[in-house]
Amino acid sequence: MTRERIVSLRNPWFTRSVGITAAIAIVAAVVGFVWLPLQHPGERFKSVWDAICSAAGLVRNAAPGTQIVRADYPTTRVEIDPQMLSGASAESIGRGATLALRCTMCHGARGLSQADTPNLAGQYPVAIYKELLDFKTGARVSAIMAPLVADLSDADMRDLAAYYAYLPRVTSSGAAAGEAPPIVTSGAPLRSIAPCGACHGEVDSKASAAWLEGQPAVYLRTQLEAFASGARRNDIGEQMRNVARGMTAAEIDAASEFYARAQ
């Protein structure tokens, strides 16, 4: 007695099941990528392909005559490249050390602050360069930093970034960081808050995201509150503002204290 193979075009049950599954998939794709986008109020697509691209989340160019809403305040102009400022020369670091003499009152002689301002020693060079350029263009507002960066050239800012990145980071004072709070490790998915470590992690840090370990708690708390209120707005794509707005005061305190102890 022979048994017919199940997976065979000769098996009518197999061919019917495959046909029904394919039909369901096609109908679902048509509904999700064509019919539903076309039914969305206020959307006017030039073609079916335009509707499919929209449903797939692809960026579409604005139609001619479409009013584009732009921010009424200066925004960051820095185009981030993960490899930018890597491999700084000794000459660049030396020039940066000379330029950094004007920074010592607030950021310390070796980039370690005693005034609740950021510790710059060992900071990622891209993060330093971005903030300096934002201070210069007005994307980040500071009555103290603005006059100090006003006469810096692009080369000067790159040299400063190279120098501070060259310095050793803050050393441990012996205080244990303790267990990281949930907002740092897991975020708050129900509130669309990504974990802090997703961008500021030691291994998988995002380009332009600053090194936070060992920064003064007062500074970290102040910056998170500034992002939440909109007083600081030089984050790319409002990423930090969107995160900080959803954080509670307790979560801001917990994250600030944790990173201040983590060295």
Image (tube, helix red, strand yellow):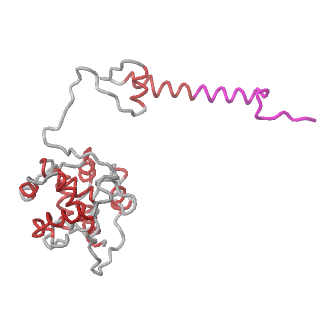
* Quarter of the C terminus within the rendering: bottom left
Is 199 a magenta residue? no
Lateral position of residue 220 relative to residue 44, left or right: left
How many discs mark residues in the rendered view? 0
Of residues 103 and 252, the one nearer the viewer is 103
Of residues 179 and 169, the one nearer the viewer is 169
Q: Is residue 34 above or below residue 77?
A: above
Furthest-bottom residue in this view = 174
Q: Is residue 172 above or below residue 209?
A: below
The image position of residue 19, as x and y in percent, is 66, 26
Q: Residue at x 12, y 54 (%)?
A: 152
Q: Quadrant of residue 61?
A: top left
The image position of residue 47, as x and y in percent, is 40, 18
Is 8 a magenta residue? yes
Where are the magenta residues, as a range?
A: 1-24
Of residues 115 and 81, the one nearer the viewer is 81
Q: Residue at x 10, y 65 (%)?
A: 102
The image position of residue 50, as x and y in percent, is 39, 23
* Quarter of the N terminus within the rendering: top right
The image position of residue 180, as x and y in percent, is 35, 67
Of residues 79 and 216, the one nearer the viewer is 79
Q: Quadrant of residue 126?
A: bottom left
Q: Is residue 181 above or below residue 175?
A: above
Q: Residue at x 11, y 55 (%)?
A: 149
